[in-house]
Image (spheres, rainbow, N blue to C red):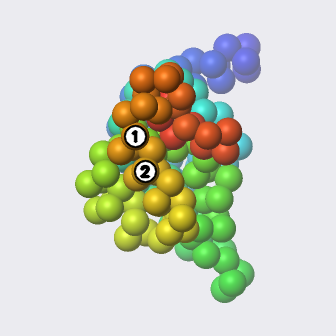
Amino acid sequence: KERVLHHACVEFILNNAEDVFHSEGFKNHMPEDELIRILGNDNLDANETEIFQAVIRWGEHQLSKQKDKEMTLDIVVRRLIPYIRFGRMTSRQIVDIVQPTNILAPEQLMKILTLQLSDTQLEKGQYGTSEHNLMRPR
């Protein structure tokens, strides 16, 4: 019964992601491992910008509960970032939304923007690199 309930909850989140991402319960109660499973699911019904902003809100909330003053946002969301398909964002979204957070190193940003400019990557059916699912559609 628990497995059926869990599956129903995950399906609800996948199909109503943007509403869930804006709920208090999301940032207050979503365990990191479950969030990773949701972000990695190809059926997640949300655009990547919304997903990125939800991860940042979740991370900021987790950071606010930390007693460790050395902890930073990029450390808190480190395990989640590889599941964001940055290549599905526009270059404007990368520059205006992602870059100001300083979550990605400059070389990571350059790699994403370079892949976006390379139409041959899409034509060959290559959706990014092994460390990121940059261009893979949801």
Cβ atoms under marks 1 and 2 closer than 8 Å:
yes
Q: Is residue 20 above or below residue 22?
A: above
Horizontal arrangement in the rendering, residue 17 relative to residue 128 (left or right): left
Amino acid type, label 2: Thr
The residue lying at 36 percent from left, 56 percent from top is: 94
**Could you tell me how many numbered marks the image carries?**
2
Question: Which secondary structure lies at badge 1?
Answer: loop
Horizontal arrangement in the rendering, residue 20 relative to residue 103 (left or right): left
Closer-to-camera residue (23/78): 78
Q: Quadrant of residue 20?
A: top left
Q: Position of residue 33 (x, y in %)?
A: 71, 43
Q: Is residue 134 visible?
A: yes
Q: Quadrant of residue 105?
A: bottom right
Q: Quadrant of residue 16?
A: top left
Q: Position of residue 121 (x, y in %)?
A: 47, 32
Q: Which mark is residue 118?
A: 1
Closer-to-camera residue (99/121): 121
Question: Which secondary structure lies at badge 2?
Answer: helix
The residue lying at 49 percent from left, 23 percent from top is: 124
Q: Position of residue 131 (x, y in %)?
A: 67, 45
Horizontal arrangement in the rendering, residue 96 relative to residue 10 (left or right): left
The residue lying at 67 percent from left, 39 percent from top is: 130
Q: Position of residue 123 (x, y in %)?
A: 42, 23
Q: CA distance from mark 1 to mark 2?
A: 6 Å
Q: Residues within 10 Å of mark 2 (few under 14, many from 20)?
A: few
The residue lying at 60 percent from left, 33 percent from top is: 40
Amino acid type, label 1: Ser
Q: Which mark is residue 134?
A: none
Q: Is residue 13 visible?
A: no
Residue located beneath label 2 in the image: 114
